[in-house]
Image (spheres, grey):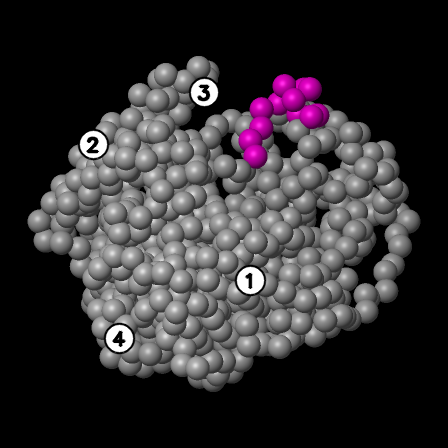
Amino acid sequence: MSELLDQLNEPQREAASCTEGPVMIIAGAGSGKTRTLTYRIAHLMEKGVDPFHILALTFTNKAADEMKERIIKLVGGEGRNLWMGTFHSVFARVLRAEATKLGYTSSFTIYDTDDSKAAIKQVVKLLNLDPKTYKPNFVLSRISMAKSNLLGPKDYQENPEIYQTDIDSKRPAIGQIYQMYDQRLRNSNAMDFDDLLFNMNVLLRDFPEVLLKYQQRFQYIMVDEYQDTNYAQYLIVKKLAARQQNICVVGDDAQSIYAFRGANIQNIFNFKRDYPNMQLFKLEQNYRSTKNIVNAANSIISRNRDQIQKELWSDNSEGNLIRLIRAVDERDEGTRVADSIMNYHLGEDADYRDFAILYRQNSLSRAIEDALRKMNIPYRIYQGLSFYGRREVKDVLAYMRMVVNPHDDESLVRIINYPARGIGQTTLDKIRVAAADNDVSIWTVLENLENFGLPISSSTVQRLTEFMYMIKRFESQVHDTDAFTLAKQIVYASGIIKALREEDDPESAERIDNIDELLNGVQEFCEGSEEGNQGQEAVGAEQGLRTLDEFLQQVLLYTSEDKDKDKDADKVSLMTIHAAKGLEFPYVYVVGMEEQIFPSFLAMSRPELEEERRLFYVAVTRAEKQVTLSYAQNRFNNGQRTSGEVSRFIEEIDTKFIEMPAARRGFAEAGTLPRAFFNAGKPAQSAPKPKTNQSVSKPRTAVVPNSPAQINSIMPGMKVSHDKFGIGKVLNIEGDGDSRKATVFFEGVGNKQLMLKFAKLSIVED
């Protein structure tokens, strides 16, 4: 066996050395999962496998970067040629290489959550729907869940059970919003995060030659955190691995906590069904925590019925018992937690960065923050606003995105009048309506202003033209100018720095510093190696350039912890338990340990309760030295003070491992309730389960303008049909050729002025 693997313990070594055929590695908390996966990849390369044929998929950029750095240390620079990254970043690379097959260009924009919410908000406005009923967060979550289960707009609208769920939630128009939102993305040459998975599935399904190409390329596939995969990710991996069958999945069913965003724990439970000849390895030695913490965690998770059996153990010291804080109310809880932290800080010389306070609900942080401030204990809210989510950074990125893809509507709307250049909201609304009515991007309207005949003053037209020419000037340089040079030109030509300097705002200096930091990031990107460019057939790559479109491909998929300038500061970390997964701290406090809070009042059926218990297991196993659990006897809830009772999870811990009162109360197991697929708040509503043979919407081709013959055949007095507005009557025709436009009256909508080149009108025969 390789000397390289001698650095692993026996179970790790056995797992890392088994390189052929399907393999599942169940890795308990703190058991060296990343180390095992890293050495397995290095071992493959040592055996002569070309890194170009190895695909490693993770859920965070941080995990991918850490693993790649370790591999490079083990095997040298060849490690840079691995296909390693998050599901979204790797599939984005593939989709850029194959974009034209799906009706996109390779410069498509990736919308983040804020972009998607803004687009949905605009769709709701165009459909004259109540924005309070159709809140972007809710609508986006429904669309996201649909895409994760490979349901396109047509599938969604034609599913009676999903439609009934929307009716029950008094939001019957979500399917219509989904349809328009999807079309806006395509008009903008953009995909959201869920589209990267949805479209990857469509690509592999509809283009057999593409599937074969990537099956031959990815001869060894490894998937980290397999328990967190959703239906779309599961299908992609299964298709890619079908030819070679050299698939290795690593995960822990006891840490499956993301069902709310589509993760399906059945993927890991059913791995043996999918691959009957699979080999199973278990990593059960915990290197992180004391024996008491590990044993307490075992006693917690043993209550779950659905699990792959394993028993964590540790060679570390016994350590302290788990401690309890019983508080009178939330203020008392905050004070007691802050006192405890200060005692450890002074008594054991612990740094503030050694402490984490975890909670089930974000709202629980307020009283904790108040107490920490009173005692001058520095803290940070982990995974709050990321560097790339800051206003000024998003403004600069919007300019860059426009330069790479001018049809990106959300970026255009963000920057067209920032800094102020005399283009008012009224003008923008006119252009937006024209774009929506003609089913084209806003940029298309700008390029054809004279044809649309919008009532805009000549001075405003001049300002719009100047803006457009500025973007076009930079667009022409994308493939023959390095990213840093072009980014710097864009920043200063945009006028953002000048505008910030002129603002009477004490935070402006920090905003300018953040823009400088962004430019530093672009410069680092340009000075770095060509790693991570597999599958990107960019023109600049042939010239050895790192181009702006390549930089955006990387940066638009960063997770919130990336570029977090505060992450190494000596501060107490406050975060939700979901955000804590993958992290570790010497001292961990879990607050709000009360029934109806943790477990949540929404999680009373067995599947949901078991996930809540797994979440508690994750919280406890973040700790290295000490776990402290706190609960309040009463706290404010919806403006009223209510009494609480201690969480059942505390009472489930074996008494040997916890300091708590002798009196313990038992709980009967909660009854089971049916869980609705796409649950919209009605727990009794049944809904369909995803099927492996579920039909998936075909990708629409790019919008094709009407032919000259079609344009010229439409005359006043004719009845016409429009996809969005229905049946209408042509009242008037103006212009010639491509500039021909029609005024059409639609019942219930009114008069609409449409460019015939783009309107896709059909003549209705009486």
Check the image and report above or below for 348 versus 131: above
Q: Is residue 325 above or below residue 596?
A: above
Q: Nearer the viewer, mark 1 or mark 4?
A: 1
Relative vertical location of residue 122 with respect to residue 631 in this rendering, above or below: below
Instruction: Tell me the distance, in whole angstroms, between the alpha carbons under discs 3 and 2.
Output: 24 Å
- Amino acid of disc 1: Gly
Q: From mark 1 to mark 2, how far is it between C-alphas?
A: 49 Å
Q: Residue at x 43, y 57 (%)?
A: 752
The residue that label 3 is drawn on is 507
Q: Nearer the N terminus, badge 1 or badge 3?
A: 3
Residue 748: assigned label: 1
Q: Are marks 4 and 3 in contact (CB under 8 Å)?
A: no
What's under tag 4, amino acid-wise?
Val
Which labelled disc corresponds to residue 257? none
Mark on residue 210? 4
Amino acid type, mark 2: Gln
Does residue 357 lie above or below 70 as drawn? Answer: above
Q: Residue at x 49, y 73 (%)?
A: 154
Left or right, 713 with reference to 276: left
In the picture of the structure, the residue carrying the numbered disc 2 is 489
Q: Which segment did they paint magenta?
A: 370-381
Depth check, front residue: 681 or 446? 446
Q: CA–CA distance between discs 4 and 2?
A: 38 Å
Q: Residues within 10 Å of mark 3 (few under 14, many from 20)?
A: few
Q: CA distance from mark 4 to mark 3?
A: 50 Å
